[in-house]
Image (spheres, helix red, strand yellow):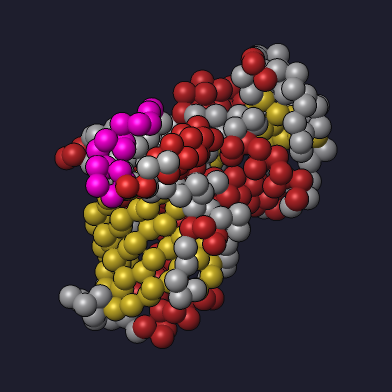
Amino acid sequence: MRVAVVGATGAVGTDLLRLLRLRSFPATEVVPFASERSAGRTIDGADVPVRVMADDTIDGFDIALFSAGGSTSRTWARRFVERGTTVVDNSSAWRMHDDVPLVVSEVNPDALDGHHGIIANPNCTTMVAMLPLKALHDVYGLREMVATSFQAAGGAGQKGIDELAAQVPVLSEDMEALRTDGASAMRRVEHSVHADTLAFNVVPMLGAIGEEGYTDEELKLRNESRKILDIPDLLVSPTCVRVPVMVGHAVAIRATFERTVDLDEANAALAAFPNLVVQDVPTPLEWAGRDETAVGRVRRDLADPERSLNLFVVGDNLLKGAALNTVQLAELLHQRGLVRATARA
């Protein structure tokens, strides 16, 4: 198969190239696409130099893996599909389209059947929560969740990581100001990627304000969870917070179920779920760079011990939250004979 990687020079794109190679994806050729400023550049994991997308450069691909933002996906995904290519897209452009499956490889792989050329990858925060919620939903029937995310700077891509990294040494020069005059300390650095200064801080604002004062990031957590888990009436109360972590999202979840929960049975269901690890106190730093999702602090809710559990979930937002799931979906498409290419090199 010929594989196109769109957005190949970004943080997720470079991971896509690396994972295709490390996981021995059956590609005869991997072609990177990026903006004109990267054209001709040679990057690790690709078989040819970087190309720019045009009508005469996108022919003959079996699969295209997109991680270049919503506007690029809206412009180019259909063009690839018209040429017989199957597209797996990382952006938010197609996730809530009725005819586009939104898939987590371990959670709802059967949603790939009957696709129409485009498969959507969930938001990285939603992705982290889906594995443990699916494990518990299958046993108890999920009805409600209160979810508070702790999202890494890397959720905004390389530029988010770079902004946090630049702020830390400046604010570290005056630790006393961090204790006694935080507002003055914050003004010593600039921010444009995150909603406010992130170093030594937490910022309870990600994305644009939308419905009822919730951000689009928070609404993604609600809407995508309903679609992936196939619970259209799932009640979700989301709050998304940016934290000074480079890579690795965490979500604190209060999940309420239809049936009475048993703590030992719940932990057994979590431990048995594919690519999910139960750990007492999982942290984003420890799980950065690891493929699995970790869940811990599993306990009965104090206000509703019969039907509600509290848990803390951690996952690498650039791996399982983006690049890894994308490659896993490409693997599933190949294994199930669902790559629908009509064009060949």
Image quarter (top left, top right, bottom left or bottom right) of the C terminus: top right
Left or right, residue 267 beside residue 221: right
Q: Find residue 109 and report its image quarter.
A: bottom right
Where the N terminus falls, by quadrant?
top right
Whether residue 195 is visible here, answered yes or no, is: no
What x and y, as percent, mark residue 244? 41, 47
Compared with residue 106, is residue 197 higher up or lower down, i.e. above or below? above
Q: Is residue 112 magenta?
A: no
| Marker count (numbered) | 0
Q: Which is more toward the observer, 192 or 109?
A: 192
Does residue 173 appear in this view? yes
Q: Look at the image and say whether residue 187 sits in the magenta stretch.
A: yes
Image-based side of 90 in relation to 178, left or right: right
Q: Residue at x 45, y 53 (%)?
A: 249
Q: Considering depth in this image, is 97 or 31 the residue closer to the camera?
A: 31
**Residue 45 location (% of width, % of height):** 76, 38
Instruction: Residue at 66%, 38% (x, y): give it.
Output: 14
Q: Is residue 17 left or right of residue 204?
A: right
- Residue 121 rendering spot, x and y as whole percentages: 51, 44
Image coordinates for residue 222, horizontal then vertical, percent = 31, 49
Tell me the residue at 47%/40% (across/down): 169
Going 34% across and 62% down the picture, which residue do you hit? 252
Q: Which residues are magenta?
A: 177-192
Seen in the image, is 345 located left or right of residue 208? right
Does residue 64 sit above or below 292 in this rendering? Answer: above
